[in-house]
Image (spheres, rainbow, N blue to C red):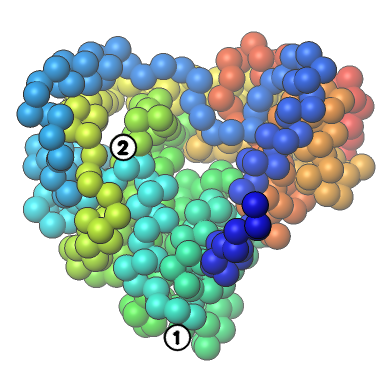
Amino acid sequence: MPEVAVSRRLAQLPTYLFAKIDELKKDVLASGADIIDLGTGDPDTPTAPRVIEQLYTSAKIEENHRYPSYSGLRILRETVARWFEGRFSVKLNPENEILPLLGSKEGIGHIPLAFVNEGDVALVPDPGYPVYQAGTILAGGKPSFLPLYKDNEFLPQLNSVSEDIARRAKIMFINYPNNPTTATASKEFFKEVVRFAKKYEIVVCHDAAYSEVTFGDYQAPSFLEVGGAMDVGVEFHSLSKTYNMTGWRVAWACGNPQIISALLKVKTNLDSGMFQPIQYAAIEALNNSDEEVSRVAKIYMERRDALIDGLTKIGWKVPRPKATLYVWLPLPSSFTSSFELTEYLLREAHIVTTPGVGFGACGEGFIRIALTVPRERIEEAVGRISHLKLTYH
């Protein structure tokens, strides 16, 4: 069969980083090794039984088997509005300021299609969630990377964006609490983003998927809490990590009604909405959220502390994040390549991690560890690492 020619846009996409890790895992698994997978951020604890029961109950109702509304159930949007006001003291109009999504990845990947023309620029954090770059390329746009450096607390320096790039930019992605760096952002930073976006007429897309996975007294703010944010942007929220519902594909975008309307127009041409029983299950999750959110966050905090305390005892220098289900770990002094360390840990200790460079060039020098295995397995991973005698200067 002759080779099939793919589009130039598809050819521009970098290899999805988890695909590379999977190839390495196959070799190690073939040897019969016991792998501890700290790579993918996929929660290992189950969805709450009451949410599953609601799905089951709703799935037995015949009318729920028909095509759903493109804009989602009104009752789901009203539930999101109540939750959002209770959590962030921000009032949203369920009619035109909230849009359910088939996972936040879907909405993030589609939104460039609404605003980016051929050759337009999207400002993309580096390191960052790969979908920001991929969605931009598939829309015909050009990613312009915003470096996130430790010295600036992994916040982009907007005053370093050239005038030419800023004027060509149509959208900007930001993400706090951040994947992969675990950094958090203040309202002062969000105010700076609003000023920048208004000056250059840029649509802001804030990915807040980890807003509820926070530790201790820290609570992540919403971008929409800041004055003027509703004029320039939208925020993406997801039930995936907070409610252990990654496979359910349920999330929403909220904010500026014109931006929401444009995203809805894209979606009406590309999907047919969310299965209604899943929407009812999402309502159940959001209506009984406080206890579940606290329970999940406590699990990740205990795992975070087990990992960091253990690595600190054997000489590693590990920052303690205030949010997310990850740890962003600087490389030991004997390594200069994050992919080299990832491969070494997999082959020598049978531990899967994610190389920082897979999230962008500025991610080099770090690996990401996901706290998605039980504490006992994390402690076992630390034990395996200790036998490798890796050190920092």
Q: Is residue 96 above or below residue 53?
A: below
For image coordinates 61% across by 24% down, the residue present is 305
Kind of residue sitting beneath label 2: Val
Using residue 384 as the reference point, say whether residue 278 is left or right of it: left
Residue 254 pos. (x, y %): 25, 53
Q: Are marks 1 and 2 in contact (CB under 8 Å)?
A: no
Q: Residues within 10 Å of mark 1 (few under 14, many from 20)?
A: some
Question: Is 234 in front, or is 278?
Answer: 278
Question: Relative to 106, does residue 137 appear above or below in the rendering?
Answer: below
- Residue picked out by circle 2: 250
Of 276 and 87, which appears nearest the observer?
Answer: 276
Whether residue 146 appears in this view of the structure is no
Residue 57, image x, y percentages: 16, 16
Give the x, y percent position of residue 80: 19, 40
Rendered image quadrant of residue 24: top right
Residue mark closest to the camera, 1 vs 2: 2
Q: Is residue 170 visible?
A: yes
- In the foreground, 162 or 140: 140
Identify the residue at image location x=81%, y=36%. Answer: 343
Figure check: 377 above or below 122: above
Disc 2 residue crowd, few under 14, some 14–19, many 20+, Cα 10 Å: many
Mark 1 and mark 2: Cα distance apart in space: 34 Å
Amino acid type indicated by mark 1? Arg
Looking at the picture, how far across and down is residue 77, in whole percent? Answer: 15, 43
Quick check: 310 left or right of 45? right
**Circle count:** 2
Residue occupying the point 32% across, 68% down: 114
Residue at image mark 1:
167
> Dot 2: what SS?
loop
